[in-house]
Image (tube, rainbow, N blue to C red):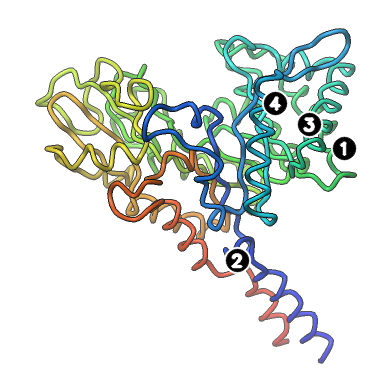
Amino acid sequence: MMWRSVLMLSLVCFMFGSVNGIGGKRLMCYFSSDSPKTKGYGRYTANEIPLELCSDVIYRGISFPEWRRGSYFFDNAEIQQLGGFMYTVKARSAAVRSFVTVLERGKEALSYSIMAEIPERRRAFVKAILELLEQYGLGGVEIAWEWPGTMVKFGGISSDRESLISLLMDVRAGLKSRNKELLFFGAVYPKVLRESYRVTSICQLVDYVTLFTFDMRPHTNNVADVHAPMRNRSFETELNRARTNVVDGVETWIDFGCPPKKLILGIGLFGQAYTLANPASYNVGAPTVGPGAEGQYYYEGYYPYYELCLLIRSGWSLFYDPIGQMPFAVRGNQWMSYEDTTSIGVKMNFVQEKRLGGVILQYVDYDDFWGFCGTRNPLTTFIYQRLQQIPSDIGFAIEWNKK
């Protein structure tokens, strides 16, 4: 019937409607608020962001606001820096969406817990957020509460699980009338998923969950490992890391009730380096004695892609973890895990297979934006092009029209 054809065409147009040309999938790009302060070639500003590739730019981030005289106040210096960032982004592109992340830094432990538990403070927090979004024309906010409830060493308290839902409800209510979006930075650690989150409720309240599927292997484990493995390996059984990997983490969010289209897979554009206990023992799972040597631009144990892509060309031996499905490089007692187009290709296939909502980059300023190793922004460009190749979910409409 004609009306079915018209409706199907409308659905096709809607689902193929592009977000910066990537077929409805989001390519969210974290911008580190510290990157403009990085020395030398590492300095990166809003002018360098490839806005033609990113559907969304997330300014990560600003510190948790200070509670004074019944209200919350963001740090003035940080707000001024955010304002300058937004001025540049808006001048360069009217299409890209911009968000800001509210972080809870070490000195602010318990800030989210205290605020979320007290209705008066939740209302004040929402008010401060809305004023910030309106002042700078931001499209939404990302709540980065690491991690509620169970992670005592990070300042969590037992009431956090329910307080988180109350907070998201209040923020959602405030944003809805202003056509703003709500993002939630979500862990994939099994303990957090089980004990800290009411997954179904979270996913009903937020627009997207930005997943922490990178940097999952801290140096404190004293084991050389790829930082975002697709699956666990046999040596991890004794390390209490069961199911702490990309596949199990994403599937647990889905199994617990989150629609796949609301899940945004995190991909880290950095290398994580370790110092081996014995240079002769360098396979995945080898003992380490701490972070790797400090590079030119960031703190010890971490290298932006634009630095590591040159570094590993100078006498490093390259290997690949077939189960974790990520590369690593070794030179002497230095061991480096990183992403390349092969490992990212595996993750993009997974995004397509699971029909996830897209990808978020940690951070866009870590890519090879100078083109030191070839073309500019090679990893971001690869992800953008791969997202373009993912068909929209229109099969149901086509089949229905045939009836």
Q: In the rendered view, does 121 fall on the left or right side of 305? A: right
Residue type at mark 4 is Ile
Residue, disc 2? 23
Is the residue under label 1 in contact with that under label 2 (CB below 8 Å)? Answer: no
Residue type at mark 3 is Leu
In which quadrant of the rendered view does residue 280 lie? Answer: top left
Q: Position of residue 16 (x, y in %)?
A: 65, 71
Q: Nearer the viewer, residue 241 or 384?
A: 384
Q: Nearer the viewer, mark 1 or mark 4?
A: 4
SS category of the residue bearing label 4: helix
Residue type at mark 1 is Ala
Q: Quadrant of the C terminus?
A: bottom right
Dot 4, crowdedness within 10 Å: few (<14), some or many (≥20)?
A: some
Distance from Cα at disc 2 to Cα at disc 1: 29 Å
What residue is rendered at 27% in x and 24% in y?
274
Residue, disc 1? 173
Is the residue under label 3 in contact with that under label 2 (CB below 8 Å)? Answer: no
What residue is rendered at 61% in x and 29% in y?
61
Distance from Cα at disc 1 to Cα at disc 4: 24 Å
Looking at the image, can residue 108 be seen? yes
Q: Nearer the viewer, mark 1 or mark 3?
A: 3
